[in-house]
Image: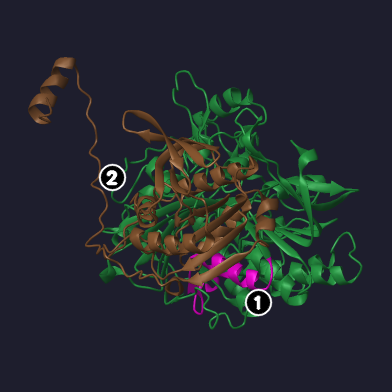
Chain colours: A green, B brown
Amino acid sequence: MSGTAREAMEFDVVVVGGGPSGLAAAIRLKQLAPEASVCLLEKGGEIGAHILSGAVIETRALDELIPDWKEKGAPLRTPATEDRMLFLWKKRSVSLPTPPQMHNTGNYIVSLGEVCRWLAAQAEELGVEIYPGFAAAELLEEDGRVVGVATGDMGIGRNGEPGPNHAPGMELRASYTLFAEGCRGSLAKQLMQRFGLREGVDPQTYGLGIKELWEIPKERHRPGLIQHTMGWPLDKHTYGGSWLYHFGDNLVSYGFVVGLDYRNTWLSPFDEMQRLKNHPAVRRHLEGGKRLSYGARALSEGGLQSVPRLSFPGGLLIGDTAGFLNVPKIKGTHTAMKSGMLAAEAVAEALEKGRPAEPRSFTRRVRRSWLWDELRRARNVRPAFARYGQLGGFIYSAVDTVLLRGRAPWTLHHPHTDHAVLEPADAAAPIAYPKPDGKLTFDKLSSVFLSNTNHEEDQPVHLRLRDPGRWRTVNWDRFRSPESRYCPAGVYEVPDPDAPELRINAQNCVHCKTCDIKDPTENIDWSAPEGGGGPNYPVGM
Amino acid sequence: MKLLVPVKRVIDYNVKPRVKADNSGVETAGVKMSMNPFDEIAVEEAVRLKEKGVATEIVVVSVGAAQAADTLRTAMAMGADRAILVQAEEAPEPLAVAKILRALVEREQPRLVLMGKQAIDDDMNATGQMLAGLLGWGQGTFASKIEAGGDALSVTREVDGGLETISLVLPAIVTVDLRLNEPRYASLPNIMKARKKPLETIAAAGLGVDVAPRLQTLRVVEPPERKAGIRVGSVAELVNKLRDEARVI
């Protein structure tokens, strides 16, 4: 936009994204190469503002990164004490045996946003320069090598013209750039295309997680309790389920994940999440409590089969941008951190050995680590659910992980991209969702309000239809606007079905990236808005 | 002319504040904090005065916890030259802040103190006026326009029913209102440069000011929930309801 007026700054390493993988990479790098200059960009208004996770975390990576994390006051305060796995019908539930990979002994229930804020403080102590409020909006490339990123301009008006307080973006140039944007990173997407990183691997498959943070009466709070459910309200072909964790000071994290390979265009992940709260298995935990916060984020569920090439000239993909989530464990924090640490090791070596274009040793390090071993054992679980449905998938997983210990001589694949499997509106059964009661269940707008999301209004819309004409013929005529249902933030709206037109309320966006994934023809392009925009999740989320 | 600009670290205006479970106040732990928006306007105005050659140095000051240093860095990224952090345990009341500012005015000898008309957390709208009283300086509050000329300032104030323009003899206090300007972004290069600007930290006690609270908070509660509206069928029905049910006409 205004490439000529931009200032530039040189670093040894630039990290894009202040989540667990980016922060772990920055910390490890300064541990290994204290002299290296490391800069980390975060699009959220502060570190943690865009972090959304359950979260029960395994400490394996943290133990390796900061062995004395307890003494240093890491906010891991609620040890997991009780695991419950329920299968639900509309009114009833039955306990299932907890799958071995879901045993949480030794794990902690945390607010991942709080953990990230703490990690950021550790990184800053080591000399990492952290700049929240700035989105990496553009890749810088020279002679076929990524040489850094540029932040977006600030103060560009809705019409695309610079306004009175326009401030041009800045070039952050580096020998190596680590992309830690989380699931479906907008720059990672460009990198995958530019360098063909997805060639020869399965398509990525995703889930959408929607979360609420509740404060409940003290007498019913059981810190350490972990409950997961499968089954109702989803049909047997749709992958997903809920989590419910008691932690902290009378807090409960309640959330729901739907596999984005769902087929029924009438499905609304938000309404599924709301109506599940009416089930006694969930209701008894939340009733009488108060909802404090709300948010949503997509996650990568493809596992090993979908991990792209990890290195390219000038940089690496780490964390959930690459897709290191362990689906059966429903954990990705420890794997994300481990991938960041391994990337730091590869980069530290490359910095020392003449700065070759591509820090290739990262892939080798990943494949030799426990991270890869974990993903290898877990690889068949998610595709089995896609193939055999909820119960079939559960039984298959028991055979694969318990009897075969993840050593099955076959690998199940992800045959489709998530956006390609949606069925047309007239072929799918409409779903009638109950009205919210305003106490336990809520509508979308009052929910989005609790995400504290905000975007400067006078800026170009960051959600664009590549081909605006296609919305009417494809999204409306065939699918009846699935985006107005899958978007958990009410960004997409069709105010008048008799004269259908799509309204995009981009200010509501919580940066979950679902529209970029699930649009039937991938016609929606999510790009980074002005830095600092988006949700402001408080500590606790 | 040297300017002193006090800034306060408050809950970010995008965040929906939450009352603490024991009703003792508003939850601030782990909540996103940023510069009071009115103070941002004051910093912006100071920077503009410097760009016009009216001001020579901008000193920003904040009274509060150690994290207020972030707010001061933001002000320096916008263009302030140096910063003073007066560290105090809990957020001191306006009178204590005014006394601290008086001590700093005596030390720094600014000709003008530019500050937000109020902070969006407690909405007190008091510190500027108290400081003017303590110093015996003239004050222009709720400024929507400031014009400098020689040893005086012309300040347009937003008052009930319109605008009022006054002339202030320096030294003076000006508190700024929303429409004065639109603050600039702290750009990334300037944030990087601001890390190297001087930030001095002093303890409130070192200034000889008693910051003990004079006010006691009894209870903080959420405002009552707004009731849903109704749709009336006719003007007559509306008039009847306003007269008989709401009893406002």
Dot 2 or dot 1: first in sequence order is 1
Vertical placement of residue A442 versus A285, above or below: above
Residue that appears at 65% across and 55% down? B191
- Per the rendered image, the range of residues in magenta is A100-128
| Residue A113 in sight in this render | no
Image location (x, y in percent) of residue A287: 28, 58
Vertical placement of residue A188 versus B207, above or below: above
Pointer 1: what residue? A65
Pointer 2: what residue? A437
Residue that appears at 51% across and 64% down? B107
Q: Nearer the viewer, residue A297 or B42?
A: B42
Q: Is residue A106 on the magenta stretch?
A: yes
Image location (x, y in percent) of residue B3: 54, 51
In the rendered structure, are the residues bearing label 2 and label 1 in contact, judged by CB atoms less than 8 Å apart?
no
- Circle 1 packing at 10 Å, graded few (<14), some (14-19), many (20+), is some
Vertical placement of residue A484 versus A322, above or below: above
Q: Which mark is residue A150?
A: none
For residue A122, side relative to residue A222 (left or right): right
Number of the front mark, 2 or 1: 1
| Residue lying at the far left of the rendered structure | B244
The chain holding disc 1 is A
Query: Secondary structure beneath disc 1?
Result: helix
